[in-house]
Image (spheres, helix red, strand yellow):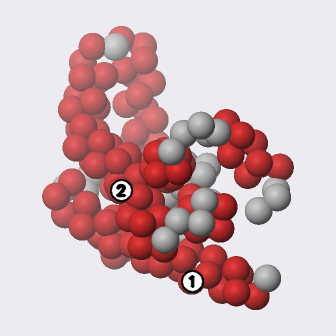
Amino acid sequence: MNHPAIQYILHFFQGFPPELTLFILSFLPLTEKVALAIGIAVFHMPIWEAFAWVILGNLVPITIILGLGERFHMWISKNSGFFGVAWAKTILHMQNKFAKYQKYELWGLFFFMALPLPLNGGITASIIAFVLGMPAKKAWPYLFAGVVVSNLITLAVTVGLIRIF
């Protein structure tokens, strides 16, 4: 993994334990989909260990957004004047934009999360769940399953590429 972006990330986290690096990388939107590959190919961690750290890291933003999203929305709407109005308009715009996907509900959320593509991560999926008004207790298991499937796909690709090269 000699890509300049990967080298920059590794340099930034130099001195951090590999487990903490994986945990942090897996909840950041731009690195969550490559964290598992970094753990296996760069840190040479056992597959099960890298997989566990990445799953835990993926679940952090999902749990925070689903758990606190409604409270944050109520607080910002009541206490923030101009920002609160802008927030409400943004949420309404997003609800209208995602309305056509409402029919897929929780399964749509699962498949969105399960695709290991950039920006299809936990933060985006949990924001979509919040915007579409999906109850956190119902959305969380689907997002968890999506995280596992996404990382299993990433694992298969990573191990396959390591064996080829």
- Name the residue type under label 1: Ala
Which disc, if any, is residue 97? none
Question: What x and y, as percent, mark residue 51?
Answer: 44, 68
Rendered position, 156 above or below 57: below
Residue 22 makes an appearance in the image: yes
**Residue at image coords 37%, 31%:** 88
**Residue at image coords 48%, 74%:** 47
Which disc, if any, is residue 56? 2
Of mark 1 and mark 2, the one earlier in the sequence is 2
Question: What x and y, as percent, mark residue 124?
Answer: 47, 52
Residue 117 makes an appearance in the image: no
Residue at numbered disc 1: 156
Q: Quadrant of the N terminus?
A: bottom right
Rendered position, 126 above or below 161: above
**Residue at image coords 40%, 41%:** 92
What is the secondary structure assignment of the residue under circle 1? helix
Toward the viewer: 71 or 92?
A: 71
What is the secondary structure assignment of the residue under circle 2? helix
Question: What x and y, as percent, mark residue 15?
Answer: 59, 37
- Name the residue type under label 2: Leu
- Mark 1 and mark 2: Cα distance apart in space: 19 Å
Quadrant position of residue 75: top left
Q: Quadrant of the C terminus?
A: bottom right
Q: Cβ–Cβ below 8 Å for labels 1 and 2?
A: no
Rendered position, 146 above or below 95: below
Toward the viewer: 46 or 95?
A: 46
Q: Residues within 10 Å of mark 2 (few under 14, many from 20)?
A: some
